Amino acid sequence: MTIRSAISDQFRKVADEHGRVLANLDDDLPLLESGLDSLCFAVVVTRLEDSLGVDPFAAEEVLFPTTFGEFVRLYEASAQ
């Protein structure tokens, strides 16, 4: 499973569990328009840390992602 697919899966699972309508996950999608709220994002980040073994937000200097594509690339870069 790729990092992108793991992230997409978690977005879908969390949206379903929280009764949210998830937007189409393309790279240009602003995270604020994804359909997830801040609690959902916290759940996604926690689950990704458990499944991927990385937490890119723990780094000293993090440029917070604003789009789905930036979110994916942040995890891909942290996994290297």
Image (spheres, rainbow, N blue to C red):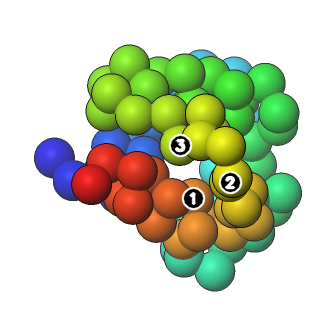
- Can residue 66 be spotted in the picture? yes
Secondary structure, mark 2, is: loop
Secondary structure, mark 1, is: helix
- Of the pair 78 and 67, the residue shown nearer to us: 78
Is residue 69 left or right of 57 when viewed as pictured? left
- Of the pair 19 and 29, the residue shown nearer to us: 29
**Picture coordinates of residue 33 (x, y %)?**
81, 61
Looking at the picture, does residue 18 appear above or below residue 57? above
Examine the image and state in which quarter residue 19 appears.
top right
Which quadrant, please, contains the C terminus? bottom left
Please give the residue where the numbered disc 2 appears in the rendered image: 62
Label 3 to label 1, Cα distance in Å?
10 Å
Looking at the picture, does residue 24 appear above or below residue 52? below
Q: How many marks?
A: 3
- Asked if disc 2 and disc 3 are in contact, CB closer than 8 Å, the reply is yes
Secondary structure, mark 3, is: helix
Is residue 51 left or right of 16 when viewed as pictured? left
**Picture coordinates of residue 61 (x, y %)?**
69, 52
Q: Residues within 10 Å of mark 1 (few under 14, many from 20)?
A: some
Label 2 to label 3, Cα distance in Å?
7 Å
Please give the residue where the numbered disc 1 appears in the rendered image: 71
**Picture coordinates of residue 11 (x, y %)?**
53, 41
Looking at the image, is mark 3 or mark 1 earlier in the sequence?
3
- Asked if disc 2 and disc 1 are in contact, CB closer than 8 Å, the reply is no
- Residue type marked 2: Val
| The residue positioned farthest toward the bottom in the image shown | 28
Please give the residue where the numbered disc 3 appears in the rendered image: 56
- Asked if disc 3 and disc 1 are in contact, CB closer than 8 Å, the reply is no
